Image (cartoon, rainbow, N blue to C red):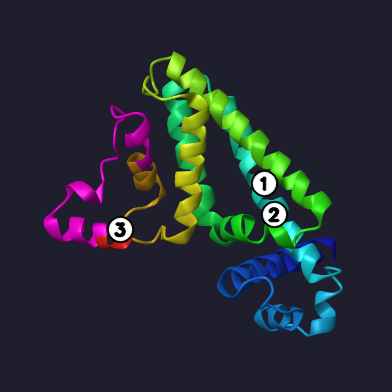
Amino acid sequence: MARNKATSRQRIVEEAARLFELRGYHETTIDDIAASVGVAKPTIYRYVRSKQQVLEEIFERLVTRLRRDLQRVASIHDPRSQLRELVRSSVVAVADLRPHFTIFFYEDRELPMRSRRRFRQYARGINETVAAILERCQRAGVLRQDVQPKLAALFLLGMITSMARWFDPSGPLNADQMADQVLRFFAPDAPETDTMPLTGPPSARRKAHRKME
């Protein structure tokens, strides 16, 4: 029963995230979420107290995923592998939780002030961790030397989170290939994957370019 409840709660949160991204938080009702999940409205309230609680859980899931990924990246000893995995895991997170990223940056004003402060504090912590990783990579000669790690962290996170608006992992570039593209800005000598469409025939390059516009 507990497992079924967790599964149903997860489905509610996922559908709510999709609808919040599509319509906006204010324009989405509990009735909309119930219809999308395929249950009656009273059933929704068996799992969540309110629409605002669903919003908080969307934020919580995103932050938990990012902090977990960063903890794993921070434990990698080889700086080159660490930098690559930092970028790759971030791109994969965008692919997995695309609506969550959009909501995080556009709907935080709908959170209670206490929750808003908490999540902003988490975001600062994430940025500081990324900056520390980049500083280590720079000392090891992996990250280009003409950038400040703290600014590089802001640029990197901004670049990656903006992908939530347009990146389609089923398109011409998968997550690993997109990570290669991002790495070129920070580590120009980083090796590429073997299946980079941007170096393929002209038709593939045109398709990739159109997709990224």
Q: Amino acid at mark 1?
A: Val
Over which residues does the magenta segment extend?
Answer: 182-209
The residue labelled by disc 2 is 59
Q: Is residue 38 visible?
A: no
Q: Position of residue 36 (x, y in %)?
A: 65, 80
Q: Earlier in the sequence, mark 1 or mark 3?
A: 1
Answer left or right for 208 relative to 151: left
Q: How many marks?
A: 3
Q: Are marks 2 and 1 in contact (CB under 8 Å)?
A: yes
Q: Is disc 3 surrounded by few (<14), some (14 to 19) or many (20+) residues within 10 Å? A: some
Q: Earlier in the sequence, mark 3 or mark 2?
A: 2
Membership of 202 in magenta stretch:
yes
Q: Residue at x 77, y 45 (%)?
A: 118
Q: Residue at x 32, y 57 (%)?
A: 212
Residue 21 position by quadrant: bottom right
Q: Quadrant of residue 186?
A: top left
What residue did someone put label 1 on? 63
| In this rendering, the label closer to the viewer, 3 or 2 | 2
| Figure check: 26 above or below 132 | below
Residue at 34% across / 35% down in the picture?
185
Please state which amino acid type lies under the numbered disc 3.
Pro
**What label sits on residue 181 in the rendered view?**
none
Give the number of the disc on residue 172: 3
Q: Residue 108: percent from the left, percent from the top?
A: 69, 57
